Amino acid sequence: MMTEPYFIDTHAHLHLPPFADDLPQVLERATDNGVGRIIEIGYNLDSSRAALALAEAHPQIYAVVGVQPNYAVALPGDWLAQVRALAHHPKVVAIGEIGLDFYWNKATPEQQETVFCEQLALARELRLPVVIHSREAQADTVRVLRAHAIGQPGVMHSFSGDWAYALQCLEIGFYLSLAGPVTFSKAHDLHDVARRAPLDRLLTETDCPYLTPHPHRGKRNEPAYVRLVAERIATLRGLTTPACAEAVWYNAAQAFSFAPVNI
């Protein structure tokens, strides 16, 4: 059992320029706020390599590698082989972030779905979970996951839907990862999901440097603030923060095959 809250940020982008000047201080603040692990997420080949480099340099950081839907264009012919090679590293814990994005539409829906399905197959081959990016594409994301990922472990990154969508994702068997918006006073659908979802299917993330939680909105997000996400979930569910932190830690250990589970 944990004697103190021990938080996990399951989705960060610390390799991005906003952290170039003070990453050591950012990591120190995370530790000071009880953040024991950070999962650095790739979204294309270059960022996947950067995620792995951070994981190799810092024991508390793990990596996720893959190609996000907005980068599903102009890929080299061996892109999937490159992802596969990166994924064999022992500090890579999932394939991601992958999925569909019909908001930006930087790639056609057909291009996005092809790259999505190829990476779902790769994750099955490597027995790795998947981290899903879905924006303005809920119905099609569910359709693809039902066709290709039933029984496959996965995480809905920065879940932003209502309870009906949450229930569909839970029925597929995926975890719901909540980020800064759950702390916003008007995020009623997210509050409902945080209350109603099984506690053993919830995760916490920052998606830093984006989606900064209250009361720091408008500033750069960072892993230390994942504590605020966990505290808000705990309040919504009528739990203590340590109880929520322990449950989420255990969930992350199951989702990403971490060991040991408890601290």
Image: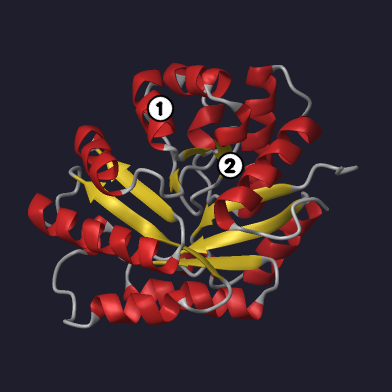
Look at label 1 and name its amino acid: Ala
Find the distance from the CA under tag 2 to the CA under tag 1.
Answer: 15 Å
Quadrant in the rendering for residue 146: top left
Residue neighbourhood size for the residue with mark 2, other residues' Cα within 10 Å, grouped as few (<14), some (14–19), many (≥20): many
**Front in this rendered view, residue 121 or 142:** 121
| Residue positioned 48% across, 32% down in the render | 181
Residue furthest right as drawn = 3
Task: State left or right for residue 239 relative to residue 66.
Answer: right
| Residue positioned 59% across, 74% down in the render | 55
Disc on res. 204? 2
Q: Report the colour scheme.
A: secondary structure
User: Residue 97, how many percent across, how many down?
Assistant: 38, 57
Note whether residue 108 is visible.
no
Look at label 2 and name its amino acid: Thr
**Front in this rendered view, residue 7 or 86:** 86
Residue neighbourhood size for the residue with mark 1, other residues' Cα within 10 Å, grouped as few (<14), some (14–19), many (≥20): many
Question: Up-down: is 28 above or below 143?
Answer: below
Task: Classify the position of the N terminus by image quarter.
Answer: top right
Q: Which residue is mark 1?
A: 166
- Number of marks in the rendered image: 2
| Residue positioned 42% across, 53% down in the render | 131
Task: State left or right for residue 139 relative to residue 19.
Answer: left
Question: Up-down: is 58 above or below 235?
Answer: below
- Tell me the SS state at disc 1: helix
- Tell me the SS state at disc 2: strand
Disc on res. 36? none
Quadrant in the rendering for residue 216: top right
User: Residue 56, how many percent across, how many down?
Assistant: 61, 80
Q: Nearer the viewer, mark 2 or mark 1?
A: 1
User: Residue 110, how many percent across, how many down?
Assistant: 9, 54
Q: Which mark is first along the chain, 1 or 2?
A: 1
| Residue positioned 56% across, 28% down in the render | 183
